[in-house]
Amino acid sequence: MLRTKTILLITISFFLCGSLAFAGGLGLGFGLSDAFAPAATAEPAATPPAVSTYEPAERPTPRENLVFEDDFSREGWDVVQDSDHRQGYEDEQYFIVIDTTDFSYWSVAGKTFDDFVLEVETLQLDGPDNNDYGVILRYQDDDNFYSFEISGDGYYTFSKAVDGQYFSIIPWRESRTINSGHNANLLRVEAVGSNFTLYINDELVDAAIDSEFSQGDIGLVVGTYEEPGTHVAFDNLKVWEVEGK
């Protein structure tokens, strides 16, 4: 049975000498973007253990073994409607609309993947540009997963939840590759072992290392901040299995 979860959005940024250390695992983000967004005051963090520097490949990981595909022409993900949000199917797309502030809603596919490349088309249809939307990766349960998200005002982030606590592996960063406002964006994540490479509209924007979760489910997520009304549609979700990496 597919599941949906509501959470209060909490952004906690730990930034220490270019490395980020988190409870339960190490997270490293490598900035390839245009600029940093303003970040919250850093809290004390443990000194991270030594790790090898991860250099993202100049070319995308091969996409040959397609193991999952959904064009959302048939129902299979959650269909929900309440006073705070709606999610379901329209025009052969899957959508999430949030009518309250400071919350995220998501749905997961009910699959398990190890090393993979994920790609999905997104389209912001309505609402304020100060929002977030994107994909969930290596989902264990509602309290443990990764997420790669962008915003309507041109920023992206890569985060994780560990036992219900939220950490920014890559804090919000601005990128000119994002089509801001009510526009379409193509998101792609390469998750190979502890290495994550992030693409927006076929442009490499960032990379990260984190070993918290090695496998899990995938999902789609949308969130709001001070203003409600965010409406995002998803289409043509594809997952390729990566072997021999």
Image (cartoon, rainbow, N blue to C red):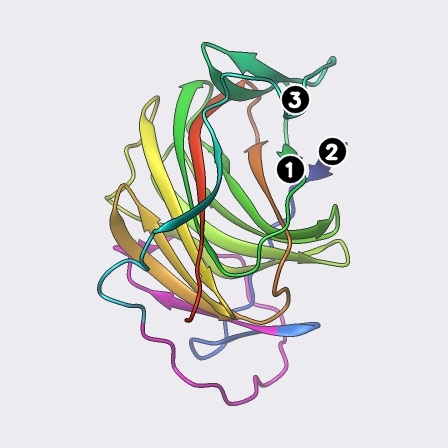
The image position of residue 196, as x and y in percent, is: 44, 62
Q: In terms of image quadrants, where is residue 26?
A: bottom right
* CA distance for labels 2 and 3: 20 Å
Q: Which residue is at the front of the view, 38 or 26?
A: 26
Would you say residue 224 is visible in this rendering? no
Question: Which residue is label 2 attached to?
Answer: 3
Residue lying at 46% horizontally and 51% vertically, measured from the top left:
157
**Label 1's element?**
strand
Q: Earlier in the sequence, mark 2 or mark 3?
A: 2
Residue 46 sits above or below residue 223 on the image: below
Residue 181 image point, x, y percent: 34, 26
Q: What span is in magenta?
A: 26-55
Q: Is residue 16 visible?
A: yes
Question: Which residue occupies 55% across, 24% down?
Answer: 227
Look at the picture and state if 107 lies above or below 239: above
Mark sitting on residue 108: 1
Dots 1, 3 in contact, CB < 8 A: no
Specify whether 154 is left or right of 150.
left
- Residue at 62% across, 77% down: 45
Please, what is the three-letter code of the amino acid marked with disc 2? Answer: Arg
Left or right, 1 with reference to 161: right
Please tell me whether mark 2 sits on a helix, a strand or a loop.
Answer: loop
Q: Amino acid at mark 1?
A: Val
Query: What numbered label is drawn on residue 10?
Result: none
Question: Would residue 223 be counted in the magenta stretch?
Answer: no
